[in-house]
Amino acid sequence: MSENKSKSEDGKLYSSVNSELDLDRPNLEDYLSSESLPEPHGKLRLRDLIDISPALTEAAGAIVDDSFTRCFKSNPPEPWNWNIYLLPLWCFGVVVRYLIIFPIRVLVLTIGWIIFLSLYMPVHFLLKGQDSLRKNLERSLVELICSFFVASWTGVIKYHGPRPSMRPKQVFVANHTSMIDFIILEQMTAFAVIMQKHPGWVGLLQSTILESLGCIWFNRTEANDRVVVSRKLREHAHGADNNPLLIFPEGTCVNNEYTVMFKKGAFELDVTVCPVAIKYNKIFVDAFWNSRKQSFTTHLLQLMTSWAVVCDVWYLEPQTKKPDETPIEFAERVRRMISHRAGLKMVPWDGYLKYSRPSPRLTQSKQQSFADSILRRCQ
């Protein structure tokens, strides 16, 4: 009896609510505009919330699905060691990596620098009159020190495709994950690279050792550097005796899961473009360098205290610009080849947005539009 009575009361309650709200009305806007709706917060009504819902939806969508920010985030692997069986083994691995393997790697890298500097300094300063011999020896020595760097990470690098040859009127383009991309490619072929000018010991290496390879440096904050770099690019690419030119057309490090837009500079030089695809395996360490959160020294220490750096490098078929193709279309075609080979997702973003904030005018216009919609309904 009590159960039937409860069901009856529930039915009456539902009927009263249904009749009050009149949910069967064909036009919900009539109800929302009626004066019978209670106003718990002054004159703000339910339809006001519906009016501002597009702005809220847009904001939530930008937070939840920000495909640009995801290109520059390091995604750590799921923890696997927090149980009674694997934790002791993981602790033992930490001791081995930091107290045994890391000192050995530091020793290997130190020996490599001693050998390199003891040979490079005499070659660079004593063979200035013999340019051809000096350049060949410097190339070999740079390849040697890069091999020592890769050995200090216990690098397991698999190269696929023919080794690049030194030919005029060709440039090599690759996706960019870290500065170690250059080191991994350099140990096979002494490329001349276009790179952002860095401070500290990296900048010292740029201005001394790497300068001998014909590398081109630029400062991202200097607008005049673009004109100078473009001119140097063209001169180097068309030079007969220059080292092969390596360009990272994304212009910034991406987390090896996406590729952002390629800059068109390398694709309007009227030369053969040789695509190179680089894919890191995150089984031991994530090789992505987030330069906004860590220095390159910290990044190297992270690599040297891991078990190994595992990487695949593919030298793809050289490409030339088609007669009816623009440099931007050519760049997208090459980006598609690299992304497909390395299994990366393409996103339509300019990587330089990583270093800039949205325009204040755009932010203020959004704020003003949102404020106007609120004030219009609260008047």
Image: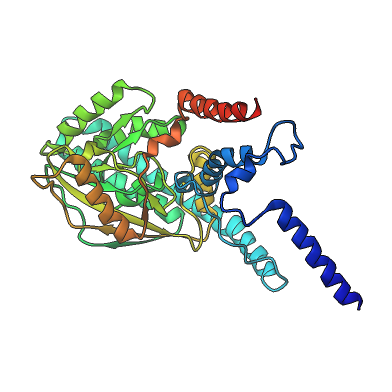
For residue 166, above or below residue 96? above
Please, which residue is most extreme toward the right here? 2
Query: In this view of the protein, can residue 267 be seen by the observer?
Result: no
The colouring scheme, among rainbow, by chain, secondary structure or one colour, is: rainbow
Where residue 261 appears, as percent x and y from the top left, is 32, 43
Where residue 226 appears, as percent x and y from the top left, is 28, 26
- The answer to whether residue 118 is left or right of residue 299 is left
Q: Quadrant of the C terminus?
A: top right
Q: Quadrant of residue 24?
A: bottom right
Q: Quadrant of the N terminus?
A: bottom right
For residue 113, above or below residue 126? below
Q: Nearer the viewer, residue 79 or 13?
A: 13
Q: Nearer the viewer, residue 37 or 346?
A: 37
Number of marks drawn:
0
Where residue 152 appears, as percent x and y from the top left, is 45, 53
- Going 52% across and 42% down the picture, which residue do you hit? 58
- The answer to whether residue 66 is left or right of residue 29 is left
Query: In this view of the protein, can residue 174 be seen by the observer?
Result: yes
- Going 84% across and 66% down the picture, which residue do you hit? 9
Where residue 232 appears, as percent x and y from the top left, is 20, 29
